[in-house]
């Protein structure tokens, strides 16, 4: 109570009044309340009582309470809040998050900590570090999932479930969030045991303290409208502008700086120290404008935040998160007139949930889109799926990457133990994705034959124009009608009509005279048909192999060696895409392109590539454990 008085907490907020007694009774709780309503303190205060009632930590004991957050910024914010209370109680709080060095966090965990605030990915790193001797989950009896739906939406579900499945089942679990869409309910039932559900306000609704605006603007108009809004709100408080992509954030920052607005970007590609610095400056008011991606979409406590601008239209209806702790806020959403019609329904729904009429132009856009889709036989609905975000989705590609990594580790172990060569070749072959294609007479219709066909077509067109096609028989023989008329006249005893030479006969007579003059005898042999040729292509994807292996097989010496050994054409195509990233439009992952006249050559080339990979792996494993020899030596 003394700490609460010192920090100027006079009375509990509605969510705190409801959640703290429920959590203290030992029940699992789902807490849903708007941003800035005091949810963090609602799960921290019962947590301290829960920890103080436990036995003190022994050596090599893990934490008693674990708080998981979707973003680093939110984890750090929760850690700072918990630190205010934990220090006077002699409790240790450690924050574990990615983007910074792991050594200091390992040291803090080894000292012993009752409370760990973490992001899911780095927590798994800590659990497997040093063969599990850094920390463990054996003593955890209090688990908090902060902004739970956002965490699952950002693609953290596999990591979160792995951690939860390794925690004792008699734990107490608490979920808190600003929204709780229906898709989260099934997941909540898996994790929680007969939870008490507390709602302050409503489920999945937009805060009514936010004044919503939506505008249909072209890409060029969006920037000028942003400048107009900054002119109106710059003196009234801080501003966050949300964009969809990291590149867009950097580009917008440079344009705004040129226009005289001091601002900073905030997204996942920025170094963690720079992210922390930008966020601290923004919260303290030294920086008034932040250009952010979805990493800043939830839970950031910025007291003087007045305006949120969704520069790129979001694909959900949580279109503005300002107005913390009862303060008034404004949200503006920009929608493109083409290509974003399906998002208009979500924005309209945001207005409806806030009991505010949506702009007429937005309604018309949504109604027109529904009619167009209905004409195509597709029925569309606004909402229903809750917040879907644009985070990475854990899918079959991720499964495949994990499987390949496991195979590669097994392969290194097999080489170190000198196991069967055939098994090693089989595993290496399975790691290379292949795509083969065979063609018969490749390029026949596109090469010389195509040119001949074009010339023949042109000649026929000229003949038609001159009227020769009707006079000239198709097979080059004499005119059948003229011969038949002469024969009929002779049979009747009449004088035959003079026989006129056809155009073909005239041409043949002229050609015979020309050949006689040139002493040339034309060949009567028919043109032989071209022999059937087969042509084979194969693509071998090598993007996911270690760097040393890729460099070795792509080197000039290795490619020349494969070409000479297998009699194939080989070229390196595509670009290396790091793990966790997706190729841009038109890009392909790094692969080898093989061309050959037969399948045997392709097979020999692939065997040679596998041999080079195997030789490189042997060199890597033999060098493991040896310090690299440098030019200088300290004596």
Image (tube, rainbow, N blue to C red):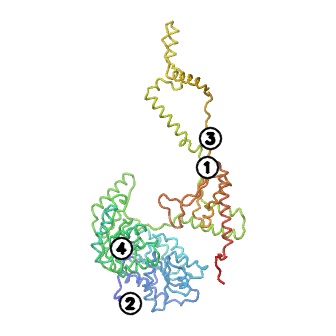
Q: Are marks 1 and 4 in contact (CB under 8 Å)?
A: no
Q: Mark 1 or 4 closer to N-term?
A: 4
Q: Which residue is mark 4?
A: 240
Q: Which residue is mark 1?
A: 536
Q: Mark 4 or 2 closer to N-term?
A: 2
Q: Which residue is mark 2?
A: 4
| 431 relative position to 175: left or right | right
Mark 2–mark 1 distance (CA, rounded to whole Å): 76 Å
Q: Mark 4 or 3 closer to N-term?
A: 4
Q: Are marks 4 and 3 in contact (CB under 8 Å)?
A: no
Q: Nearer the viewer, mark 4 or mark 3?
A: 3
User: Which is more toward the observer, 82 or 33?
Assistant: 82
Can you tell which mark lies on residue 219? Answer: none
Mark 3–mark 1 distance (CA, rounded to whole Å): 14 Å
Say if residue 416 shows up in the picture. yes
Q: Mark 2 or 1 closer to N-term?
A: 2
Q: Nearer the viewer, mark 3 or mark 2?
A: 3
Can you tell which mark lies on residue 532? Answer: 3
């Amino acid at each position: 109570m003394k700490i609460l008085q010192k920090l100027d907490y006079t009375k509990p907020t509605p969510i705190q009044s409801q959640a703290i007694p429920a959590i203290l009774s030992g029940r699992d709780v789902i807490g849903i309340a708007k941003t800035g309503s005091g949810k963090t303190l609602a799960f921290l205060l019962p947590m301290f009582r829960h920890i103080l009632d436990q036995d003190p930590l022994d050596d090599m004991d893990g934490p008693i309470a674990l708080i998981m957050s979707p973003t680093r910024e939110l984890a750090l914010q929760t850690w700072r809040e918990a630190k205010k209370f934990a220090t006077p109680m002699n409790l240790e709080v450690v924050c574990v998050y990615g983007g910074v060095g792991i050594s200091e966090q390992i040291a803090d965990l080894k000292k012993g900590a009752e409370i760990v605030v973490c992001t899911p990915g780095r927590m798994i790193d800590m659990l497997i570090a040093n063969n599990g001797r850094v920390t463990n989950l054996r003593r955890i009896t209090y688990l908090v999932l902060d902004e739970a739906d956002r965490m699952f939406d950002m693609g953290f579900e596999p990591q979160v479930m792995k951690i939860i499945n390794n925690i004792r089942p008699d734990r107490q679990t608490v979920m808190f969030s600003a929204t709780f869409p229906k898709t989260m309910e099934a997941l909540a039932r898996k994790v929680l045991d007969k939870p008490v559900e507390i709602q302050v306000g409503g489920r999945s609704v937009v805060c009514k303290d936010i004044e919503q605006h939506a505008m249909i603007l072209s890409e060029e108009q969006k920037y000028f409208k942003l400048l107009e809004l900054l002119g109106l709100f710059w003196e009234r408080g801080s501003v966050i502008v949300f964009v969809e992509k990291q590149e867009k954030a950097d580009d917008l920052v440079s344009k705004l700086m040129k226009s005289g607005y001091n601002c900073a970007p905030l997204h996942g590609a920025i170094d963690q120290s720079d992210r922390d610095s930008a966020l601290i400056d923004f919260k303290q008011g030294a920086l008034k404008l932040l250009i952010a991606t979805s990493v800043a979409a939830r839970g950031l406590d910025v007291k003087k935040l007045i305006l949120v601008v969704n520069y790129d239209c979001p694909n959900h209806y949580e279109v503005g998160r300002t107005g913390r702790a009862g303060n008034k806020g404004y949200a503006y959403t920009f929608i493109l007139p083409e290509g974003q019609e399906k998002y208009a329904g979500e924005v309209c729904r945001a207005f409806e949930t806030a009991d505010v009429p949506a702009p007429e132009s937005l309604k018309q856009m949504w109604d027109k889109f529904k009619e167009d889709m209905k004409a195509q036989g597709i029925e569309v609905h606004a909402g229903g799926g809750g917040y879907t975000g644009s985070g990475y989705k854990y899918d079959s590609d991720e499964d495949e990457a994990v499987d390949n990594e496991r195979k590669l580790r097994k392969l290194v172990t097999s080489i170190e133990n000198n196991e069967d060569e055939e098994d090693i070749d089989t595993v290496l072959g399975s790691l290379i994705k292949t795509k083969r294609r065979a063609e018969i007479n490749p390029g026949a219709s596109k090469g010389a034959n195509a040119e001949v066909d074009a010339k023949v077509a042109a000649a026929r067109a000229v003949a038609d124009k001159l009227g020769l096609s009707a006079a000239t028989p198709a097979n080059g023989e004499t005119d059948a009608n003229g011969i038949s008329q002469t024969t009929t006249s002779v049979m009747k005893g009449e004088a035959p009509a003079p026989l006129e030479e056809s155009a073909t006969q005239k041409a043949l007579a002229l050609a015979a005279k020309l050949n006689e003059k040139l002493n040339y005898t034309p060949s009567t042999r028919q043109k032989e048909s071209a022999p059937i040729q087969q042509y084979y292509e194969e693509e071998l994807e090598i993007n996911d192999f270690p760097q040393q292996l890729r460099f070795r097989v792509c080197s000039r010496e290795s490619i020349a060696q494969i070409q000479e050994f297998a009699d194939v054409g080989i070229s390196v195509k595509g670009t290396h895409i790091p793990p966790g990233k997706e190729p841009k439009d038109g890009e392909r992952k790094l692969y080898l392109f093989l061309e050959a006249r037969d399948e045997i050559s392709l097979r020999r080339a692939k065997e040679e590539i596998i041999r080079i990979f195997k030789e490189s792996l042997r060199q890597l494993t033999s060098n493991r454990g040896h310090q690299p020899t440098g030019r200088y030596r300290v004596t």
